[in-house]
Amino acid sequence: MLKKNNKGSALVVTLFILAIILISALSITLITVKERLASIGSAGSNRAYQTSETGIESVMQLIIKGNHEYIDDGTNNSLNFSLASIGANCVSGLIEGTDYKVEFLDNTGSPISCNASNVPVSDIVKIKSVGESSNSKRAVEALVSNKSTKLLMHFDELLSDNFKDSSYFDYVYNITNEGGVSKANTDPILASSDYAKFSIAGDYVEVEDAVTSDDIDFNFTDKDFTIEAWVRFDNPPGLYPTIISMGDYVSGSYADSSFWLYWDSSDNNLKFQYYNQENNDIKELSTSWTTPTVGTWYHVAFERKGGSGYFFIDGLPRSINAGGDQFGTDSMYFTGNYPIIIGGWLEGGSLYSDSQFLGDMDELRVTKGLARYPISGFTPWEDVEYVPNI
């Protein structure tokens, strides 16, 4: 992750390469090679580049194809055990292949050992590979952009008064800034990060699938997913301030509804509700959350992992309230034609007034097919936006 005011490269010679790697029929990973750290010259130099990129590709396949949660947890649910499959070994914290060495880097650029114990794979945001050929050494750094990310709103750019999606799918969405959601600059809490300000009733952002019109990107079915955002509530926060929703509650029927993530001020619970079309009913998962402190940023996350749902506030796992629902084998498949709503939910085609989110929001991300975080908790990235856009 990089600060927003540090997105450019200071290198004199920089070559950007975009390589799409199809890992398998189900693999949907995009690798963006960001920079070559020396100029291309001799044949040996070129072969060194090719070797370093081979290291990037081979190691990236292990990260994605194995669906590993941890780098090394002492079991087969780790990256470490499978290095032999690509002819590599973990030596002194680096992955060593025949002609390359690969290093993992975190969001600050600090190295992560390839045998780090119980470190989530999601902490790896950059890979550096050094290839060698004919006494020439060349380095390549790569960011991972995962197509599992269906929506990523940095809220740092307004195009004709509309915000921009930074996921791989930005080209398929129509994004409309309803009301007057504004972009605020350099918040003192989230340093160097712009954010969205929902100031008055009627402020919300609509995200519509402009290509297929079937909202398929947000049909989670019975697979894992993660929804998360940084939020800061105004005073008073309203009755059901909603971070994100999909669908439309029409004439007392939930048949056109999909899901809602919101805080319920009537009982001080953070809630995720979804419509189960198979059984024609609404399911609700909730966790107790005493009234959020006005003016305080919170990282709020909800994920489905297998048949269970999990809440996190500032990375800390929260207990699911007794007597509530769980996913089990439910499939969240939505056949309606309604958009994603950021900052409320629709009722009869209009924003339901009690669902209005008033306050500030940043780094909203929707991930399909992946529960990003260990259920034991995690440390949210602070002060910066999600970089790479994964």
Image (spheres, rainbow, N blue to C red):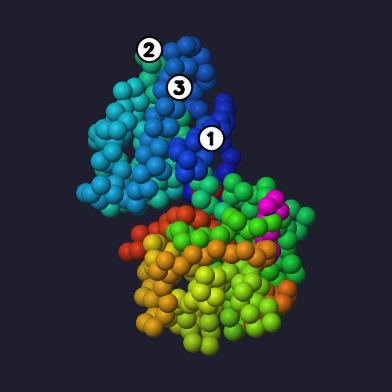
Marks 2 and 3, how far apart in space? 13 Å
Q: Is residue 28 positioned above or below 118 on the image?
A: above
Disc 2 versus disc 3: nearer the observer: 3
Disc 2 element: loop
Q: Residues within 10 Å of mark 3 (few under 14, many from 20)?
A: some
Mark 1 burial class by Cα count in 10 Å: few <14, some 14-19, many 20+: few
For marks 3 and 1, give the CA distance. 16 Å
What's the residue type where badge 3 is placed? Gln
**Mark 2: which amino acid?**
Ser
Per the picture, the main secondary structure of the magenta-coloured stretch is strand
Is residue 34 shown left or right of residue 139?
Answer: right
Q: Could you tell me residue 196's position as x and y percent?
A: 64, 64
Could you tell me which secondary element the residue under label 3 belongs to? Answer: helix
Q: Is residue 96 left or right of residue 286?
A: left
Instruction: Look at mark 1 in the image and give the residue it sits on.
Output: 20
Residue 245 lies, with reference to residue 78, above or below; the image says below
Q: Position of residue 88 (x, y in %)?
A: 29, 30
Residue indicated by mark 2: 134
Element on which disc 1 rests: strand
**For the point 40% across and 46% down, which residue is it?**
124
Residue 50: mark in rendering:
3
Q: CA distance from mark 2 to mark 1?
A: 28 Å
In the image, residue 244 sits, relative to residue 11, either above or below, namely below
* Residue numbers of the magenta segment: 205-212
Residue at position x 67%, y 60% in the image: 207
